[in-house]
Image (spheres, rainbow, N blue to C red):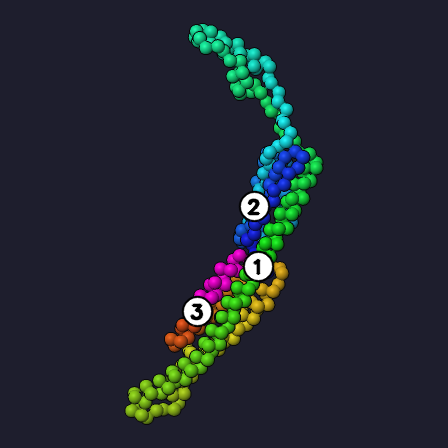
Amino acid sequence: MESMTGYAFLEKSTDQFSYSVEIKSLNSKYLEVFVNLPRTLRNDENEFAAMVKKSFTRGKIELNIDLFDWNATKPVSINGELLKKYYREIFAVHKSLGISEPFRFESILTLEGVTHKERSSISTKSRRDIINSIEAVIKKTIDMRKKEGTALRKDITSLLSLIGSDVNRIRLLSKKAVEEKKELLVNRLRGITNGSIDNNRLYSEISILAEKLDINEELVRLGDHLEKFKIIIKDKDQIGRKLDFLCQELFREINTIASKSSNSGISQHVVDVKNNIEKIREQCRNVV
């Protein structure tokens, strides 16, 4: 069993710069991959996304890469013609306005288009380092998801055990409840008929009552679903949707039991079973 929740972060340096690689994994119905890269790595987006898709089967996966602390100084070029044009225009305005303060030539360098920094390029070695780091972070995220999955399996197994105990108690109480209803029915018929009971009618009424109160089929199906749960949670494939479906089936059976029984003891166990099924369902929504 593998959880869809995971996180990993790695920070390293190359000869050119320092960088960080981060992966966040959250639950989702499908596999969703989001890649956030600096402009220098935009051409590698499809390749990095493919690495993530190859490693995960379900969940919302977000890959973030950041580059910082560049070691190499970026080359700077100056647009001489534009600089001269700015200078002539600004000097003319400066002179016509009679400004007493001296004209500062370096202020022109800050104007748009005068200077241009060359875009940094990433070396083959630096790119390989980043790819290796992505692979390492992917592995760490998967390891965390598996660790979370182990914890989920433990919790679900514990909840299944509680449900099984409640189902057994419901089974015992249901037999007692039917006998009590039969006795109540006989006493009512005696009261209505002044003690003279038509056995054929009695057996007919008891048969109808027993059929209405019989929850044996539902209990058998509940037991089958619980056993399937225990088997499926041991699988290593995608099981989240299978478990969610089984939770729906468990709800269906326990709701039918609730509608058939008016016994207070059974009703209390039904509430407990429903609460634990809901807890399992919440857990299963985070299972791959």
Quarter where residue 255 is shown: bottom left
Quarter where residue 206 is shown: bottom left
Element marked by disc 3: helix
The residue pinned by badge 3 equals 272
**Is there any visible trace of residue 143 in the rendered image?**
yes
**Residue 155 position within the rendered picture, expressed as x and y whole percent measured from the top left:** 52, 64
The residue pinned by badge 2 equals 62
Given residues 72 and 25, the one toward you in this image is: 72
**Is there any visible trace of residue 61 in the rendered image?**
no
Element marked by disc 2: strand
The residue pinned by badge 1 equals 149
- Give the mark nearest the N terminus, 3 or 2: 2
Q: Which residue is most to the bottom?
A: 196
Left or right, 251 with respect to 229, comes to left
Alpha carbon separation for disc pair 3 and 1: 25 Å
Amino acid type of disc 3? Asp
Q: Identify the residue shown where x is 34% and y is 91%.
A: 197
From the viewer's perspective, is the residue at label 1 or at label 2 nearer? 1
Quadrant of the frame with the C terminus? bottom right
Alpha carbon separation for disc pair 3 and 2: 38 Å
**How would you rate the neighbour count of disc 1 (Cα within 10 Å): few for under 14, some for 14-19, many for 20 or more?**
many
**Residue 84 position within the rendered picture, expressed as x and y whole percent measured from the top left:** 56, 12
Amino acid type of disc 2? Glu
| Vertical placement of residue 31 versus 128, above or below | below
Q: Main secondary structure of the magenta part?
A: helix
Q: Identify the residue shown where x is 59% and y is 17%.
A: 79
| Vertical placement of residue 137 versus 150, above or below | above
Element marked by disc 1: helix
**Residue 38 position within the rendered picture, expressed as x and y whole percent measured from the top left:** 58, 36
**Residue 101 position within the rendered picture, expressed as x and y whole percent measured from the top left:** 45, 10
Magenta highlight range: 272-288
